[in-house]
């Protein structure tokens, strides 16, 4: 069996399982509490969550249930807060956090910024895609092998909400983005460092803001 066939079979199986899980997640107390926390945060910014954002929240929870079943809830809250900060729970191409860009527009953006990964390789540019910005060819390859999707030859798969949710969760849990794992900072019942946890995605950029988002989500979920 060739590598492409392996990717296809694994990807279809994983995607189908995650979609079924997301559907069942919406009936769970965890989803209802997480949604309450997320709606509380969104309201504080004058935003009403759309159906698509709520659906994507369910996908993120399903991915966390799948890859992080022992989470006590604190890691999930930080993951959701990160996705809200990076993309408002909507998979995006690098260069925007809200309005969608085309592939050509994203390529032009990273070229203007002078990023090393703006080079065309295999006909693709491996700029940031997803709920968080998966960048660089080697990270697309690594994540694709880990999840069973051919992200090397189809980098736009990272824009699929189901796949983007798994990339978000696995990337943060396993340290694929920066080499730092979320468990180094968050997940202990007695100690959660939501500030330093930002190192998992982007050093300490906006660390205080995302810490505040996480706390708002947790407080909002507890009030539900």
Image (cartoon, rainbow, N blue to C red):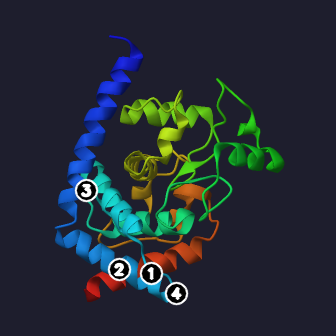
Q: Which residue carries the number 1 mark?
A: 48
Given this view, does label 3 or label 2 mark the residue nearer the observer? 3
Q: Rounded to the nearest whole Å, what is the CA distance between mark 1 and mark 2?
A: 13 Å
Given this view, does label 4 or label 2 mark the residue nearer the observer? 4
Q: Rounded to the nearest whole Å, what is the CA distance between mark 4 and mark 2?
A: 14 Å
Q: Is residue 69 visible?
A: no
Within 10 angstroms of label 3, few (less than 14), some, or many (20 or more) residues? many
User: Height in image: 42 above or below 62?
Assistant: below
Left or right of 11? Residue 121 is: right
Q: Do the residues labelled 3 and 1 touch (CB within 8 Å)?
A: no
Q: Do the residues labelled 4 and 1 touch (CB within 8 Å)?
A: no
Within 10 angstroms of label 1, few (less than 14), some, or many (20 or more) residues? few
| Quarter-of-image position of residue 77 | bottom left
Which numbered circle lies on residue 151?
A: none
Q: Where residue 222 sits: x, y (%)?
A: 27, 84
Element on which disc 4 rests: loop
Q: Which residue carries the number 4 mark?
A: 46
Of callouts 1 and 2, which one flags the residue occurring earlier in the amino acid sequence? 2
Element on which disc 1 rests: loop
Of callouts 3 and 1, which one flags the residue occurring earlier in the amino acid sequence? 3
Which numbered circle lies on residue 22?
A: 3
Of callouts 3 and 4, which one flags the residue occurring earlier in the amino acid sequence? 3
Q: Rounded to the nearest whole Å, what is the CA distance between mark 4 and mark 1?
A: 7 Å
The residue at the point 40 percent across, 85 percent down is: 40
Element on which disc 2 rests: helix
The residue at the point 74 percent across, 39 percent down is: 118
Q: Where residue 107 sits: x, y (%)?
A: 72, 43
């Amino acid at each position: 069996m060739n590598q492409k066939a392996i990717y296809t079979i694994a990807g279809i199986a994983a995607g189908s399982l995650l979609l079924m899980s997301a559907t069942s997640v919406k009936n769970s107390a965890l989803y209802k509490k997480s949604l309450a926390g997320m709606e509380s945060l969104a309201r504080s910014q004058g935003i009403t969550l759309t159906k698509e954002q709520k659906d994507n929240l369910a996908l993120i929870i399903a991915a966390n249930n799948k890859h992080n079943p022992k989470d006590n809830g604190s890691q999930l809250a930080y993951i959701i807060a990160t996705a809200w900060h990076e993309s408002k729970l909507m998979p995006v191409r690098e260069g925007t956090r809200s309005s969608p860009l085309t592939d050509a527009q994203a390529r032009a953006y990273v070229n203007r910024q002078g990023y090393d990964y703006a080079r065309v390789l295999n006909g693709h540019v491996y700029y940031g895609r997803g709920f968080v910005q998966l960048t660089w060819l080697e990270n697309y390859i690594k994540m694709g092998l880990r999840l069973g999707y051919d992200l090397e030859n189809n980098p736009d798969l990272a824009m699929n909400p189901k796949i983007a949710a798994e990339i978000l969760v696995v990337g943060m849990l396993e340290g694929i983005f920066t080499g730092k794992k979320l468990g180094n900072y968050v997940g202990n019942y007695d100690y959660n460092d939501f500030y330093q946890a930002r190192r998992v995605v982007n050093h300490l950029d906006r660390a205080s803001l995302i810490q505040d988002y996480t706390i708002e989500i947790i407080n909002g979920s507890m009030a539900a």
